[in-house]
Image (cartoon, rainbow, N blue to C red):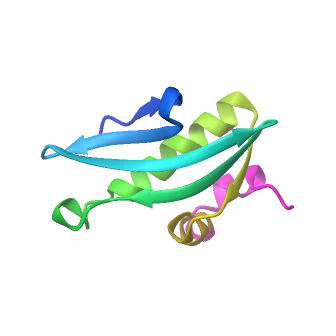
Amino acid sequence: MLDVVHNAAASRFQTSVDGVLCVLEYSLREGVMTITHTGVPDAVGGRGIAGALATAAFDAARREHWRVVPACAYVEAWIKRHPEYADLVDPA
């Protein structure tokens, strides 16, 4: 189980795996979280880290009553595999 931290000051969700920082970056404006980048270096890739970051971001969005714009390619694909979060996606 990964320990994903919401670093609100840096506008990102993050975790460290084997000493390597992995992040999901976003911007937040008027209750809309736009996910702009998911970064998992190749050295630790293939372990479900990006998915854990996305899950943490969407769980936070649900708690905070934010809408989500998946502006990064990974999260665009991820949301199609996780319809339980589709209600959070901003249609605009």
Residue 84's spot in the image, x, y percent? 65, 55
Return the residue nearer the eye: 10 or 47.
Answer: 10
Q: Residue at x 32, y 59 (%)?
A: 40
Q: Could you say which is closer to the camera, residue 46 or residue 69?
A: 69
Q: Residue at x 45, y 40 (%)?
A: 13
Q: Position of residue 86 (x, y in %)?
A: 72, 58
Residue 83 covered by magenta stretch: yes
* Left or right: where 19 falls relative to 57: left
Going by the image, does 65 lie left or right of 34? Answer: right
Q: Which residues are magenta?
A: 80-92
The relative height of residue 63 versus residue 49 in the rendered view (above or below) is: above
Return the x and y of residue 43 as percentages of the image width and height. 16, 63
- Rendered view: 81 above or below 15: below
Q: Main secondary structure of the magenta part?
A: helix
Question: Image quadrant for the C terminus?
Answer: bottom right
Q: Does residue 65 belong to the magenta stretch?
A: no
Q: Nearer the viewer, residue 60 or 7?
A: 7
Which quarter of the rendered picture does the N terminus lie within?
top left
Q: Residue at point 64% right, 63% down? A: 71
Is 55 left or right of 80, judged from the image as shown? left
Q: Is residue 24 above or below residue 39?
A: above
